[in-house]
Image (spheres, grey):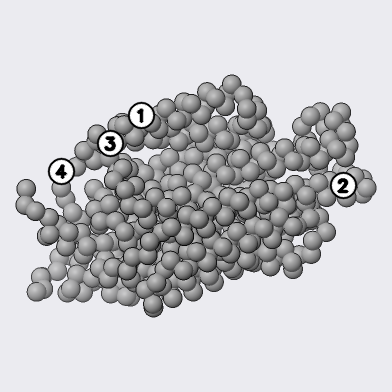
């Protein structure tokens, strides 16, 4: 049976599905928006020293320029995911891109650090929406059996944006006629283009129903997560990990999250439906997503520092040295997605990805100041291959396991926990790195020389014999970091090993929703 198409449905086939060409056109807008929103988290990495110097910021501001955006993105993902189950996905994704554009414009024109930090919050809220909604929109358009073909591309986009950010930022800063402000402004034209593309190509039916949003639950979740992220950012730098401040932050964060669970369990429309955790697959993929976040964010952040401090490379060259990891992630994500679509089997790629990721962490735990660049490149490619097989296929496994009505909440929960794992992982691993560097400085130069804390050295001012020792220190400390990270990655193997493989559905999210609604008993 066919119906006369409406004005907004003239490009849709008569069976209600978007054609392959229309899906690709819509995905182009999604991928473009996702690329620039994820890029915003990492593009400032190599530009921060210049930004801080020009705006007169302190060392604490240095950290917060990155953390503020990441915190806003992580904390708002569940809210975006819930709204996607209630309102127009197309409108929401355009709204998130609009917020991102606004934040980017303010950041690029910021006269001081205070305005810059506020703009990063707006960027983070917009990026959180894009991160959550991209996969939700995909699941609404495409059946899980076909999703592998496209989710591999999204995994590649996410990884490339995360890893290429420092390279792009380094080039912009080193280019005299551009400068650091373009680290923020570069995303504006692409985001506007993505909004226009989605307006033209994305055609999803809007289900209108009476809705309520649990704003108290959203507030408690945001406050609880923000408290823990602030603690993980400050601990080890402004106060000791084992301190009264740590107890206060952790207890406060846990109490807020416990209250959020209590509120969510009684809400008519909870932000994160607790029922999704009854699905073993969802719970295990969330655990694995946290661990992948630690491996991906931790690996890229600290390898960039290793290239500059231990190997003596410039910001631009350090960015170029990330390419093997990008290539490994791109290839494995794309190939695994194609194979999943062809054969319908997905668990083997999760297990293989976790094993390869752990192997990459172990290989990187052997690096030092004298390790050759080709060998480091090989190790990074191995890590990229592992992460590429895992990241988006975890989302695919979870989406295939839940009712269509919970697709948005489930997808946003995975994105939320992966981002939170990355945020806390970077902070915790950064504290481990700082502690190791300080102890090695004290061992080589004496406690009096370091004052108990090793400050980041200016390598250009050091005599050759001291420079050699400093490079060895950073090489040893980075290897120690990956040695600590390897057992964390190993836990991902355990998590995915217990996931039960379920045949992939051949229905899109909208078709599944219609089928489930028809099968539901009348009220």
Question: Depth-wise, is mark 4 or mark 1 nearer the camera?
Answer: 1
* Callout 2: SS: helix
Name the residue tied to disc 1. Answer: 259
Q: Are marks 2 and 1 in contact (CB under 8 Å)?
A: no
Question: Depth-wise, is mark 2 or mark 3 nearer the camera?
Answer: 3
Q: Are marks 4 and 3 in contact (CB under 8 Å)?
A: no
Q: Residue at x 42, y 43 (%)?
A: 125
Say which mark, if any, is on residue 210: 4
Q: Can residue 106 be seen in this view?
A: no
How far from the left and from the top, in percent, is residue 407? 30, 54
> Looking at the rendering, which quadrant does residue 200 occupy?
bottom left
Count residues near mark 2 (Cα–Cα under 10 Å), then give few for <14, some for 14-19, many for 20+: some
Q: Residue at x 15, y 47 (%)?
A: 209
Task: Specify which label sits upstream in the sequence, 2 or 3.
Answer: 3
Task: Specify which label sits upstream in the sequence, 4 or 1.
Answer: 4
Name the residue tied to disc 3. Answer: 265
* Callout 3: SS: helix
Count residues near mark 1 (Cα–Cα under 10 Å), then give few for <14, some for 14-19, many for 20+: some
Residue 470 appears left or right of 165:
right
Name the residue tied to disc 2. Answer: 469
Q: Distance between the residues labelled 4 and 1?
A: 26 Å
Question: Depth-wise, is mark 4 or mark 3 nearer the camera?
Answer: 3
Q: Are marks 2 and 4 in contact (CB under 8 Å)?
A: no
Q: Are marks 2 and 3 in contact (CB under 8 Å)?
A: no
Q: Distance between the residues labelled 2 and 4?
A: 66 Å
Q: Residue at x 50, y 64 (%)?
A: 351
Task: Specify which label sits upstream in the sequence, 2 or 1.
Answer: 1
* Most foreground residue, 8 or 358: 358
Count residues near mark 3 (Cα–Cα under 10 Å), then give few for <14, some for 14-19, many for 20+: some
């Amino acid at each position: 049976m066919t119906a006369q198409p409406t004005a907004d449905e003239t490009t849709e086939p008569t069976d209600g599905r978007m054609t392959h060409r229309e899906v690709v056109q819509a995905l182009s807008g999604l991928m473009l928006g996702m690329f620039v929103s994820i890029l915003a988290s990492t593009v400032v990495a190599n530009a921060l020293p210049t930004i801080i110097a020009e705006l007169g910021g302190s060392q604490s501001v240095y950290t917060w320029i990155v953390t503020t955006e990441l915190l806003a993105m992580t904390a708002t993902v569940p809210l975006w995911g819930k709204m996607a189950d209630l309102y127009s996905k197309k409108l929401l994704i355009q709204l998130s891109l609009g917020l991102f554009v606004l934040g980017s414009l303010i950041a690029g024109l910021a006269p001081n650090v205070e305005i810059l930090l506020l703009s990063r919050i707006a960027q983070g809220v917009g990026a959180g929406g894009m991160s959550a909604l991209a996969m939700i929109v995909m699941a609404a358009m495409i059946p899980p059996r076909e999703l592998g073909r496209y989710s591999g591309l999204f995994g590649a986009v996410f990884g490339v944006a995360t890893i290429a950010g420092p390279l792009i930022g380094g080039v912009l800063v080193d280019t005299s006629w551009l400068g650091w402000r373009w680290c923020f402004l570069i995303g504006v034209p692409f985001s506007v283009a993505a909004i226009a593309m989605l307006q033209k190509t994305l055609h999803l039916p809007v289900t209108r129903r009476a809705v309520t949003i649990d704003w108290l639950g959203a507030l408690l979740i945001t406050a609880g997560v923000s408290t823990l992220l602030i603690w993980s950012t400050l601990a080890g730098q402004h106060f000791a990990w084992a301190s009264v401040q740590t107890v206060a932050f952790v207890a406060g964060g846990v109490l807020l999250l416990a209250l959020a669970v209590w509120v969510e369990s009684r809400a008519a429309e909870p932000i994160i439906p607790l029922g999704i955790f009854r699905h073993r697959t969802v719970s295990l993929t969330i655990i694995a997503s946290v661990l992948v976040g630690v491996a991906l964010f931790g690996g890229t952040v600290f390898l960039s520092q290793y290239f500059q401090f231990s190997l003596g490379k410039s910001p631009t060259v350090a960015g170029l040295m990330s390419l093997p990891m990008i290539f490994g992630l791109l290839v494995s994500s794309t190939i695994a997605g194609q194979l999943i679509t062809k054969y319908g089997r997905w668990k083997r790629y999760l297990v293989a990805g976790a094993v390869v990721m752990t192997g990459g962490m172990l290989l990187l735990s052997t690096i030092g100041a004298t390790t050759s660049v080709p060998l480091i490149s090989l190790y990074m490619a191995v890590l990229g291959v592992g992460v590429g097989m895992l990241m988006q296929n975890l989302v695919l496994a979870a989406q295939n396991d839940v009712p269509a009505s919970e697709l948005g909440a489930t997808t946003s929960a995975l994105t939320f926990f992966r981002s939170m794992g990355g945020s806390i992982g970077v902070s915790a691993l950064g504290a481990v790195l700082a502690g190791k560097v300080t102890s090695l400085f004290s061992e080589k130069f004496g406690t009096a020389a370091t004052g108990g804390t090793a400050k980041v050295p200016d390598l250009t001012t050091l005599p050759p014999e001291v420079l050699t020792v400093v490079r060895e220190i950073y090489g040893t400390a980075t290897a120690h970091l990956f040695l600590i990270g390897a057992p964390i990655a190993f836990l991902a193997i355990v998590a995915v090993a217990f996931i039960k493989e379920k045949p992939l559905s051949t229905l899109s999210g909208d078709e599944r929703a219609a089928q489930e609604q028809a099968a539901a008993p009348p009220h």
